[in-house]
Amino acid sequence: MNAPANITQPVEFSLPIKNYDEFYRFYLTEHRSIASRRLHAAGSSIGLYFFSKAIRKRQAKYAVYGLVSGYACAWVGHFFFEHNKPASFKQPLYSFISDWRMLSDITRGRLSLIDRQFDKIES
């Protein structure tokens, strides 16, 4: 996979993006705010908790709680901290996959929840 373009240079994207690697580059540019990243990580973690509870309890309502809590946290991050519209409105599948990829990058230390200067990948 090619390294992402340097974000200090403007990168133009027009949705829908057909190539997933290009979409993830776009996705990271939409998640520069540390507060937004924290909300995404919290929402994905809460969502994962509720999805696992749905499986354990065999009750679909917990899956709904997972979706609602995950998207609520993410959308607060976008509307109040990033000041942009979530990509899930136009490309829901790539966006959903990227939520989990970003959480993976955070847990592996590739993206920081403290300061973007500690990121090991361009965002």
Image (cartoon, rainbow, N blue to C red):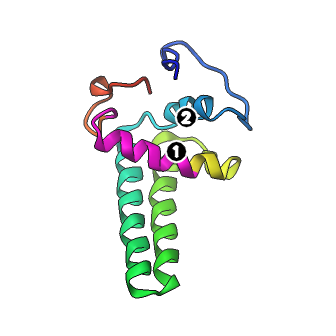
Which sits in the foreground, 59 or 27?
Answer: 59
Disc 2 to disc 1: CB gap under 8 Å: yes
Q: Is residue 119 above or below residue 36?
A: above
Q: Is residue 29 above or below residue 7?
A: below
Name which residue type carries label 1: Ser
Mark 2 crowd level (few <14, some 14–19, many ≥20, 10 Å Cα): many
Label placed on residue 24:
2
Identify the residue shown where x is 42% and y is 51%: 40
92 left or right of 66 in image: right
Q: Is residue 44 magenta?
A: no
Q: Amino acid at mark 2?
A: Tyr
Residue occupying the point 52% across, 44% down: 98
Q: Which quarter of the figure is the C terminus placed in?
A: top left
Q: Which residues are magenta?
A: 96-111
Give the number of the disc on residue 39.
Answer: none
Which residue is depicted at the point 71% across and 47% down?
90
